[in-house]
Amino acid sequence: MRNAFYICLVLLTILAWRDWNRREIVHEPGILVSAAPRQQNLESGERFDRDGFQLTRRASFDVEARVLSREDYRFDQESDLSPMDLALGWGVMSDQSVLDRIEISQGSRWYFTRYEFPAPVSDHEIITNSSNMHLIPANDWVLGKLKKIRRGDIVQLKGSLVDIDSESGFYWRTSLRRDDTGNGSCEVFFVEEAYIR
């Protein structure tokens, strides 16, 4: 009986430590990231294979942003390729005073916002200053960095927006715009460099 108590105590300690390390970082009010992502579209993109998928580079991409939410995936078809989505914000969507009034969540590869009226900023500002990105780490070093990211972090990610195809018929098409919504509006992001500020 005593052993079971100690085992439970150890497990609870591990869980509490894990939750503490993943707690949200809260900032002072004010825009933390003023610049929008930098993107250069490619006319004919390089194709390469990764984990049984064919990737086609569509644009070079460099984003500095605040992490609004993080969702890990393990069981969907594409989770071996893209184990994580980040909802990222810049401009007004990096401002704590705005984010305090917006409920942000993710699920099933989607990103959702809810707020009580009056809205802290317009829907157009929310849409054009944030996005859900499906992240594909280029290597184990990048994957290790991505696993350390938590809500509220300021991150810089560099790489390429890519389209995905597979022999099974599965495909993903990346968004190349910051003003779209709904199905197909997420960036499929092959991340080659990752930094937590």
Image (cartoon, rainbow, N blue to C red):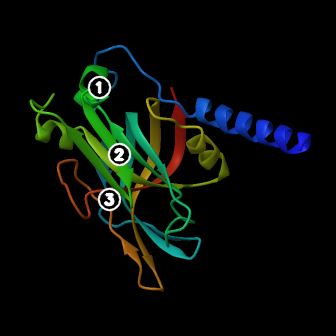
> In the figure, is residue 127 to the left or right of 83?
left
Q: Residue furthest top?
A: 28
Comparing 110 with 158, the one in front is 110
Task: From this view, report whether residue 152 is shown above or below residue 86.
Answer: above
Distance, label 3 to label 2, CA atoms, is 32 Å
Task: From this view, report whether residue 149 is shown above or below residue 52.
Answer: above
Q: Position of residue 106 (x, y in %)?
A: 37, 50
Q: Position of residue 103 (x, y in %)?
A: 29, 37
Q: For the residue labelled by badge 2, is the local secondary structure a helix, a strand or a loop?
A: strand
Distance, label 1 to label 3, CA atoms, is 38 Å
Q: Label 3 neighbourhood size at 10 Å, few (<14), some (14-19), many (20+)?
A: few
Q: Which one is earlier in the sequence, the residue at label 3 or at label 2?
A: 3
Distance, label 2 to label 1, CA atoms, is 13 Å
Return the residue at label 3: 42
Q: At 10% from the left edge and 35% from the top edge, which residue is drawn?
A: 122
Q: Amino acid at mark 3?
A: Leu
Q: Label 2 neighbourhood size at 10 Å, few (<14), some (14-19), many (20+)?
A: some
Return the residue at label 1: 100
Could you say which disc has been placed on residue 105 in the image? 2
Q: Amino acid at mark 2?
A: Ser
Q: At 35% from the left edge and 45% from the top edge, which residue is drawn?
A: 105
Q: Label 1 neighbourhood size at 10 Å, few (<14), some (14-19), many (20+)?
A: few
Q: Amino acid at mark 1?
A: Asp
Q: Which one is earlier in the sequence, the residue at label 2 or at label 1?
A: 1
> In the figure, is residue 171 to the left or right of 114?
right
